[in-house]
């Protein structure tokens, strides 16, 4: 007995739903499961598309090319590009008699000294204010994590509630279907019994009519 339900959508194709919490014909009859698997193997694979109600995936960092490129790198599991350490080196001129190479080396030395000065300044600021900033950052991160965990827990509870309601609904409908199927079987059995009784009566009537005809012919 089929228990498939068709739900008409306001927009888009109809959705076919079943009663998995009630239908157990495949479990009761293993040969049906084998036939279903063979039939599914012959069918074409369904398109790997989401439900029409699922919104499209948001495009992250559309206005930030660097972040978008980094996200693409992570999604493709590409290794991080190593840092260029040559800019932090202080090589001397390869030709000591070349004045241009000395100027380049001197300019690089000034840049390295300025870099070290900025690092020393940043370390001093970090020692003075870094602890409190880090605590605030941790507090905000923990708050965000708690909010995400709460949203996840709410979603899980909602999913559980939906599944519970669906199971209760299907169990209730399944009981009605079982009662109707039992009643249908009883009615079919009664009809068959009546038909068999009618056939027997027709045979009996034909025999009686034949006997009367034979008696009438003999008299």
Image (cartoon, rainbow, N blue to C red):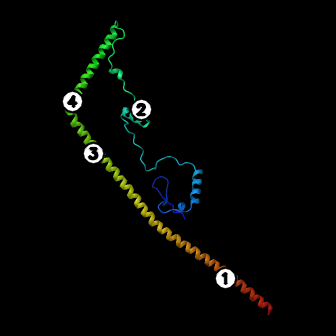
Q: Residue at x 36, y 20 (%)?
A: 86
Q: Quadrant of residue 89?
A: top left
Residue 143 is marked as 3
Give the spatial CA distance, label 4 vs label 1.
110 Å
Which type of secondary structure does the marked residue at label 4 adopt?
Answer: helix
Residue designated by label 4? 125
- 209 versus 107 height, above or below: below
Residue 164 is marked as none
Q: Quadrant of residue 213?
A: bottom right
Q: Residue at x 41, y 58 (%)?
A: 163
- 195 versus 145 height, above or below: below
Residue 11 x %, y %: 46, 53
Sequence order check: which comes first, mark 4 or mark 3? 4
Residue 216 x %, y %: 77, 91
Q: Residue furthest left?
A: 128
Residue 173 x %, y %: 46, 66
Residue designated by label 2? 79
Q: Residue furthest bottom?
A: 219
Which type of secondary structure does the marked residue at label 3 adopt?
Answer: helix
Give the spatial CA distance, label 3 vs label 1.
86 Å
- What is the crowding at mark 3: few (fewer than 14 residues within 10 Å), some, or many (at least 20)? few
Give the spatial CA distance, label 2 vs label 3.
31 Å
Which type of secondary structure does the marked residue at label 1 adopt?
Answer: helix
């Amino acid at each position: 007995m089929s228990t498939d339900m068709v739900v008409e959508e306001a927009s888009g194709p109809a959705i076919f739903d079943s009663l998995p919490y009630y239908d157990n014909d495949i479990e009761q009859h293993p040969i049906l499961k084998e036939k279903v698997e063979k039939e599914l193997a012959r069918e074409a694979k369904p398109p790997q598309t989401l439900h029409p109600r699922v919104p499209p995936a948001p495009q992250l960092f559309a206005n930030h090319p660097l972040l978008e490129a980094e996200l693409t790198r992570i999604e493709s599991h590409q290794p991080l590009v190593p840092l260029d350490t040559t800019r932090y080196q202080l090589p001397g001129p390869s030709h000591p008699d070349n004045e241009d190479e000395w100027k380049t080396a001197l300019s690089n030395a000034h840049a390295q000294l300025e870099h070290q000065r900025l690092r020393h300044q940043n370390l001093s600021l970090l020692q003075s204010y870094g602890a409190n900033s880090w605590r605030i950052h941790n507090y905000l991160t923990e708050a965000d994590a708690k909010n995400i965990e709460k949203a996840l827990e709410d979603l899980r509870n909602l999913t559980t509630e939906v599944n519970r309601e669906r199971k209760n609904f299907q169990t209730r409908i399944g009981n009605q279907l079982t009662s109707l199927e039992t009643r249908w079987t009883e009615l079919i059995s009664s009809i068959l019994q009546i038909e068999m009784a009618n056939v027997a009566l027709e045979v009996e009537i034909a025999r009686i009519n034949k006997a009367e005809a034979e008696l009438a012919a003999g008299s």
